Image: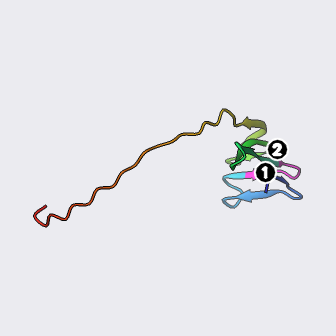
Amino acid sequence: MIRVEVRLIDDISLGLGLLVRLNKGASMTFQRRRVNNEIWLPAEAHFSGAGRLLLFKGLRIDASTEFSDYRKFTVETSVKYSTDKNR
């Protein structure tokens, strides 16, 4: 999957509504991008919505995160086995 979009069609509660309650209409998008024609890595995440935290604190969130500057690393590994039983 390259892109996932989620939108709440009804309110959702976590912790019996005591911890978090997200209101209808909240949305989340997650997108991946192919890097170096080799692997799919996260490119962008976005959340937008309103709700309540701990029953009292109302909040509105519109947050985006963008991932970039991926670099390819190479490492060398070696494994040595000893046949000496005194070790």
Contact (CB < 8 A) between labels 1 and 2? yes
Residue 59, relative to residue 39: is it above or below?
above
Q: Which mark is residue 22?
A: 1
- Which residue in the structure is indicated by mark 2? 49
Which image quadrant for residue 84? bottom left
Please, which residue is most extreme toward the left here?
86
Q: Residue furthest bottom?
A: 85
Q: Is 65 in front, or is 13?
A: 65
Residue 12 location, x and y as percent? 79, 58
Residue found at x 81% / y 47%: 29
Amino acid type of disc 1?
A: Leu
Residue 64: quarter of image:
top right
Where residue 43 appears, x then y in whole percent? 74, 41
Marker count (numbered): 2
Which element type, helix, strand or loop, lies under badge 2? strand
Image quadrant occupied by the C terminus: bottom left
**Who's the residue at 89% across and 58% down the image?**
9
Give the magenta part as a residue range: 21-27
Q: Residue at x 67, y 47 (%)?
A: 54
- SS of the residue under disc 1: strand
Question: Relative to residue 17, is residue 26 drawn left or right?
Answer: right
Residue 23 belongs to the span the image colors magenta: yes
Seen in the image, is 71 located left or right of residue 41?
Answer: left
- Residue closer to the observer: 29 or 74: 74
Q: Is residue 80 above or below residue 42?
A: below
Percent x, y of residue 62 = 80, 37
